[in-house]
Amino acid sequence: MGVITKPWFAIAVVLAAIGVWAFTIGPWGSWHERTTSTRLVLRGDTYRRQTLVSPAFSLNGGPATLRIKAVPPAGKSLMASVRWELIPTTPAADAADQGSAGLTSPSLETGPYELGNGSGRHPGGEFRLRLSAAADSAAAITATITEQRDFWHGIPVYGIILLAGVAYIGLTVVPRLRLWQHEPWIVGGHRHED
């Protein structure tokens, strides 16, 4: 149990926590980003706006972007008008964000749009994505939200680890400093007399 209060152990724990963060949800980790996709398939009447609302998904307050891509039938060109809206489904979620995009062959991809309803705050909470589109041809329109996962309620996990680590190291070092202050220091092996 005494090893928990050793300064070297505290430093080792903080370094291990930073390593786990870096190689899981941090910049070098395979879980750094999470994507959520909604696919609207346009059929039937052209130029008639069709709408799809995605199942609920959660965002944890990290930087998030939206990218929209269209795929027309093979060998056909496409002109499409797409509208999207991020709808909060819980009272704790941030306010809605929305926008529109025009897709024209040969470039059938647009974005990434940064989500955050112009407030500079990244969305956090539970949401649904409403996607609507009208086009001059049948097509599949896909909207993909990509979010960085190393944030918790908008606070970088790296900062939380460092803050907790500094507190932990402080709790292990300060008691030792107090103990050392009460012990006499021996300076040299003999006294010099005048």
Image (cartoon, rainbow, N blue to C red):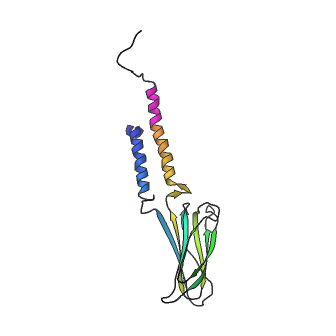
Magenta span has 182? yes
- Residue 55 shows in this picture: no
Q: In which quarter of the image is residue 30?
A: bottom left
Say which residue appears at 39% left-offset and 40% top-offset: 8
* Residue found at x 52% / y 83%: 106
Q: Residue furthest front?
A: 194
Please give the range of residues in magenta: 173-194
Q: In this view, does 72 lie above or below 162?
A: below
Quadrant, the N terminus: top left
x and y percentages locating residue 178 in the rendered image: 47, 29
Q: Residue at x 65, y 61 (%)?
A: 119
Residue furthest to the top = 194
Front-most of residues 35 and 70: 70
Location of residue 156 with respect to 183 vertically, above or below: below
Q: Is residue 162 visible?
A: yes
Relative to 92, say whether 142 is above or below. below
User: Could you say which is closer to the camera, residue 17 or residue 186?
Assistant: 186
Residue drawn 41% across and 46% down? 13
